Image (spheres, helix red, strand yellow):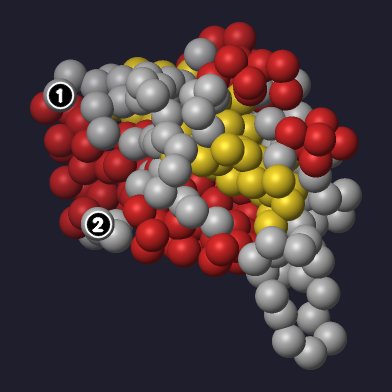
Amino acid sequence: MITSMENQQVKEARKLQRRRYRERSGTLLIEGLRLVRDALQSGVQIEKLFYAPTMVAGNQPLLKLIDHCGAANIPLLACTDEVFVTLAETVTPQGIAAVTALPVLPLPTPCHFTLILDQVRDPGNAGTLVRTAEAVGIDAVFFGPDTVDPFNDKVVRAGMGGHFRLPIRNCATWSAIQPLLDPAQVLYLAQANAPLCYTEVDWRRPSALIVGGEAAGASADAMSLARPIAIPMHGQVESLNAAIAGAVILFEAARQRRLP
């Protein structure tokens, strides 16, 4: 039983709450039944599992998951509640957390249907877009310039396991994104008051949707590369938040792509 917050394994895991340590180590700290189970089922390497016996007591799904990890020879590290809460970033932790390899799924060749986040800084919106991307069958998601870290804890939780099943790339510049795109792809940018409606686009063609941030919108680079499209709205509403706007367009694209 780990009782000290200065335990070396706890200290190393706690560092993974910061981006630079995740990138340096190539590992990720996740927490909760859903994420740990999704990582395990997706084949992501789990390096170790922390759990608080008093927190998980009587919770059969959690206990079953811990037993399953033990049977898979994943090191199990029991710790006190006081130690565990230093690893948790949720308000009411479930008592289970894991250190996993940062998931890096291979990009499909070619990528015909891509989502690009440009200056999306809200982690809830970014994670919801990852979840939506998985739901509509996106080939890959690129986190572009001035966008929140894809492996930020809140982004991963909002992604609901999508990070373990969908190719995601963190691209600091548009020059890093462009080589990942198929030359045949047409880029579209969600933008208020654009003359072209999103339903008028032929999404059956190789395409990429760029979603900009709510506050600043998309970058000048994104606007220079993409064709703007709009979601018509009634009343005094000027715009939707990034996650909702992205979902509206992505589901229309998915609908068209299912057509013969």
Please state, as top left, top right, bottom left or bottom right, where the C terminus lies in the image.
bottom left
What is the quadrant of residue 180 in the picture? top right
Label 2 secondary element: loop
Farthest-out residue, bottom: 235
Please state, as top left, top right, bottom left or bottom right, where the N terminus lies in the image.
top left
Q: Residue 72 carries which label?
A: 1
Q: In this view, does 175 lie above or below 197?
A: above
Q: Position of residue 124 (x, y in %)?
A: 63, 54
Residue 68 visible, this angle: yes
Label 1 secondary element: loop
Farthest-out residue, left: 71
Q: Position of residue 52 (x, y in %)?
A: 39, 42
> Is 244 in front, or is 255?
255
What is the quadrant of residue 166 in the picture? top left
Q: Is residue 182 above or below residue 89?
A: above
Q: Name the residue under label 2.
A: 260
Few, some or many C-alpha atoms within 10 Å of disc 2 (few <14, some 14-19, many ≥20)? few
Q: Residue at x 11, y 27 (%)?
A: 71
> Is 135 in front, or is 111?
111
Q: Which mark is residue 100?
A: none
